[in-house]
Image (cartoon, grey):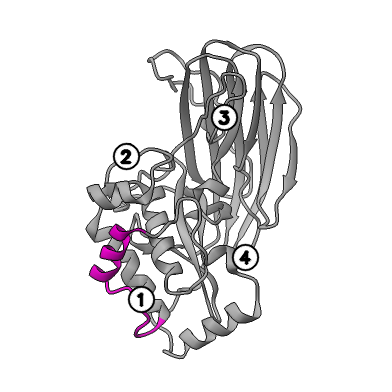
Amino acid sequence: MSTMYYSIQHHTKFQYSEPVSETIMEARLHPRTEWTQHCMSFEIEVTPRVRVFEYRDHLGNTIHHFNVPNRHSDLAITTTSLVEVQPFLNWPDTMLASAWEEIDQIVARDDYWEMLMPSHYAQPSPLLVDLAAKLHVVRRDDPMTVLRQIKTGIFENFQYLPYSTRVDSPIDDALRNGKGVCQDFAHIMITLVRQLRIPCRYVSGYVAPKEFSEDRARAGSASHAWVEALLPGLGWVGFDPTNNRTVGERHIRCAVGRDYFDVPPTKGLFRGAAAEEMTVHVNVQPVDGPQKPDAAFLYPAKETGANGAPAPRPAQTSRAPMQVFDTIRQQQQQQQ
């Protein structure tokens, strides 16, 4: 396996039924640089034109934020990234049974309480207890074996169905109906793994397309989510329950957190009483080397908006919660 280069465009547009007076927004769309992944370039463009600021949080996520203080009827965010992903080592299929004791030692020695406690969307429930019993989620064999079986169990017991849940759905919605999207499956796995006292966290990012892939999620068409569990001697190991695979060269990481609540692709609020419509276009493509993609890739000539009309030059972003002060409303993008 050779080093891969991916060009990513993420365009989000908010359209309002009448002008709003102000928007405040955060975006967590900057691919991380760590381990085998290197973000070689990143650009963000906002329309209406504003000054964009950035900071890095305690987990190493880069957050861009801005304020549109004037009246506007639409808002577009476009991010363009070039990412290098070096070959992964193959994760072992199993570990020694003594790895359970090593996990306990790591947890006792270091500060991982955030990734061990229940969080906003990763809350235990009676339905989760039933699933845990069905999948035999207990400390047995070795940690890697159990984690792989949880991943596969979620894949086999749930139907992948876009828009079958909401962005703010509790895990019980997917557990009750037996269907959901990557966001739901990640939250279910996180909650199960934490009950084993293994630190586990949510990852927001993308999966690059692959010819003849059997992925259930539409790679390259939407932001994606999976989980990482902390294992002795290996560090944070990624598991993708949506596609029943361990994470590899096609997974591109943008942000990590306790669950989706911490790392929505976009998050903001607007002032006004308008109705709002949001559209998202994501394009992830492999490129030959560390050169920037040409305009034909970044801004496809035939891209259309939700009503079939020609779409504006793509602005990349993910949408995330928006709340309302005065008459302020929440806007969020579900990770499919």
Residue 255: where, in percent of width, then height?
58, 51
Residue 27 against residue 306 in the figure, above or below? below
Residue 24 seen: yes
Whole-number angstrom distance, CA of label 3 to CA of label 1: 39 Å
Residue 101 against residue 289 in the figure, above or below? below
Residue extent of the magenta highlight: 125-142
Q: Which residue is mark 1?
A: 146
Q: Which residue is mark 4?
A: 35
In this rendering, position of residue 177 left or right of residue 320? left
Q: Earlier in the sequence, mark 1 or mark 4?
A: 4
Which-is-in-front pick, marks 4 and 2?
2
Residue that appears at 61% across and 45% down: 82
Residue 138 inside the magenta-drawn segment: yes
Q: Which residue is mark 3?
A: 323
Check disc 1 and give the amino acid type: Val
Residue that appears at 59% across and 68% down: 113
Label pair 2/3, CB-CB below 8 angstroms: no
Residue 105: where, in percent of width, then height?
58, 85
Check disc 3 and give the amino acid type: Gln
> Residue 80's image quarter?
top right
Residue 165: where, in percent of width, then height?
33, 40
Q: Which residue is mark 2?
A: 162
Of residue 198 and residue 226, the one placed in the foreground of this image is: 198
> Residue 143's image quarter?
bottom left
Check disc 2 and give the amino acid type: Pro
